[in-house]
């Protein structure tokens, strides 16, 4: 297994000044550390951000240079695809086929933003003036990502920021630093020095990055509590903040739903990446008369799924990524069972090494149980009965989060009308969590601030610059 320790790396990919003890990286399939990454000190950020600022002066000038570099970067990511995917599976846990798909999405994001350019626009309000809106880059951007999709989310942040003419300091989660370091090596080889820098380490590295006065935009993906801390830290320098935060997406099944027809799709919308997806289905609401059918259909799938190490061919579901997350999932399930819920499938940790949890379908769950009201972010799905559609919509909208939601039924017009009533950023009909690169991605309520994705993601990394002059030029 190649690792970043043996990789030749351009100097600008990583900062010097590690602490003596490096950061151990654990394989969640074994629970054992298999490699390590630098545990960089927050003080090292001053030099990194200074270099990033200097690199910005040239990088912001020519969009054609940036576009070519991003396209070349996408090719380089694909060329390193096998190595990136294996390393991602090793540290994150997901099946190798999913890691390959994540690498492909990483390259696709680089290519998509390579082709996007902001549009200048004339404003004509009838007055005798020319007013033209142009777009300028911001400066060094701090990009902070979680451990569930380290590569894809890194590209979702870096590609629009770089395409817009900014430089980037990218910080992965301490649970998944290695594939991101390799991605950094691949990309810095095709970018000018210091345009992209990857930093790794324990907190307070992220906290220092978000409060640093040299950072002009903080683009963060992670949990709601950390998002609040990031917004507070960035307030000191009034850096722009884009926050993509947690979700507790509901799937509402209507009474004309064909249960067998949708069961596979619904199951994987909840359990892909071991449920560690911000916009996974995290609660299912079912008409009372269909409740038993839906629980049985989902439980049959949960019981038959192949759970194992991501590198084993045939594995469909890997381990939970890390020990604290496994403890949280275990706690939420135990609490629900204590409160009267029943596990129609799973309900427990799997014996043996590694952070494996049996895919779990919960029924008879009290509606105020934390496994319903909070984001579980693991292989656990509560299925709740409802009597009226109004009751289901109210329940779907009852949490503080509003990332996505879906409505499932045979009459798609009726399902679409119910979906209109969901308080969320994206509502799907008869599927869930499908995204296009060209669409905006933004959560409602506590699920986010600002917009990522599509041209909106590019403009989120730019500021308007207006040139205003009289129509009749006079000297
Ligand atoms: P987290 O909030 O614990 O950590 C996210 C990142 O922030 C990590 O890199 C972490 O090291 C860093 N961090 C921690 N404390 C910080 C601080 N004080 N200042 C700055 N950075 C800090 O989240 P996690 O457990 O890594 O990821 C899971 C969460 O991410 C879930 O809530 C999930 O829904 C969310 N998520 C959201 C999206 C989205 O697009 N909305 C996508 C993926 C994941």
Image (cartoon, rainbow, N blue to C red):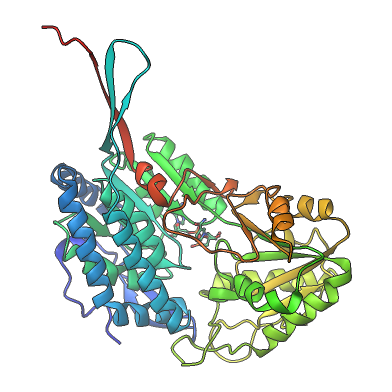
Q: Is residue 327 visible?
A: no
Task: State the residue lying farthest toward the top.
Answer: 475
Q: Could you tell whether 133 is left or right of 283 in the image? A: left
Residue extending farthest to the left is 475
Q: Quadrant of the N terminus?
A: bottom left
Spot occupied by residue 334 in the image (x, y as percentages of width and height): 75, 74
Q: What residue lies at 42% left-to-right and 59% top-to-bottom? A: 145
Q: Which of these two is toward me, 454 or 210?
A: 454
Front residue (pair 33, 105): 105
Note whether residue 471 is visible. yes
In the figure, 79 relative to 453: above or below? below
Q: Residue 357 location, x and y as percent? A: 63, 81
Q: Quadrant of residue 414?
A: bottom right
Which percent across, then down, holds residue 417?
71, 51
User: How many marks do you count on the picture?
Assistant: 0
Q: Quadrant of the C terminus?
A: top left
* Residue 300, percent from left and from top: 73, 86
| Residue at the image position 87 percent from the left and 67 percent from the top | 288
User: Which image quadrant for residue 215?
Assistant: top left
Q: Is residue 264 above or below residue 421?
A: below
The residue depicted at 47 percent of the width and 80 percent of the height is 93
44 sits to left or right of 381: left
Q: Nearer the viewer, residue 270 or 229?
A: 270
**145 vs 295, nearest the viewer:** 295
């Amino acid at each position: 297994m190649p690792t970043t320790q043996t990789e030749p790396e351009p100097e600008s990919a990583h900062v010097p000044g590690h602490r003596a003890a490096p950061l151990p990286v654990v394989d969640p399939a074994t629970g054992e550390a298999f490699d390590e990454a630098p545990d960089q000190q927050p003080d090292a950020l001053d030099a990194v951000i200074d270099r990033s600022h200097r690199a910005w002066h040239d990088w912001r000038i020519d969009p054609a240079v940036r576009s070519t570099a991003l396209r070349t970067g996408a090719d380089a990511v694909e060329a390193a695809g096998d190595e990136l995917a294996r390393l991602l599976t090793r540290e994150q846990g997901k099946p190798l086929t999913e890691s390959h798909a994540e690498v492909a999405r990483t390259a696709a994001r680089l290519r998509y933003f390579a082709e996007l350019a902001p549009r200048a626009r004339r404003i004509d309000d009838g007055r005798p003036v020319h007013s033209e809106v142009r777009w300028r880059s911001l400066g060094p951007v701090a990009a902070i990502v979680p451990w569930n999709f380290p590569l894809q989310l890194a590209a979702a942040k870096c590609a629009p920021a770089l395409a817009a003419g900014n430089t980037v300091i990218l910080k992965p989660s301490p649970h998944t630093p290695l594939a991101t370091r390799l991605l950094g090596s691949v990309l810095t080889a095709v970018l000018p020095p210091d345009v992209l820098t990857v930093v790794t380490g324990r907190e307070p590295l992220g906290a220092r990055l978000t409060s640093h006065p040299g950072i002009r935009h903080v683009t963060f993906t992670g949990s709601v509590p950390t998002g609040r801390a990031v917004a507070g830290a960035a307030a000191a320098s009034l850096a722009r903040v884009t926050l993509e935060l947690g979700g507790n997406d509901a799937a509402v099944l209507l009474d004309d739903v064909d249960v067998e027809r949708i069961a596979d799709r619904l199951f994987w919308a909840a359990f892909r990446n071991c449920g560690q997806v911000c916009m996974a289905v995290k609660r299912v609401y079912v008409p009372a008369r269909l409740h038993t059918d839906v629980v049985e259909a989902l439980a049959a799938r949960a019981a038959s799924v192949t759970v194992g190490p991501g590198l084993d061919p045939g594995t469909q579901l890997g381990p939970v990524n890390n020990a604290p997350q496994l403890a949280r999932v275990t706690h939420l399930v135990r609490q629900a069972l204590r409160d009267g819920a029943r596990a129609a499938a799973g309900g427990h940790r799997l014996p043996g090494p590694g952070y494996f949890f049996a895919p779990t379908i919960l029924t008879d769950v009290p509606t105020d149980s934390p496994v319903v009201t909070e984001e579980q972010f693991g292989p656990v799905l509560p299925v709740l009965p409802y009597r009226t559609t109004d009751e289901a919509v109210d329940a779907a909208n009852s949490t503080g989060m509003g990332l996505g939601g879906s409505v499932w039924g045979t009459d798609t017009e009726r399902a679409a009308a119910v979906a209109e009533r969901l308080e969320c950023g994206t509502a799907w009909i008869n599927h869930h969590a499908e995204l296009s690169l060209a669409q905006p991605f933004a959560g409602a309520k506590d699920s986010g601030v600002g917009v990522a994705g599509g041209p909106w993601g590019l403009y989120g990394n730019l500021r308007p610059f207006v040139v205003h002059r009289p129509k009749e030029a006079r000297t």
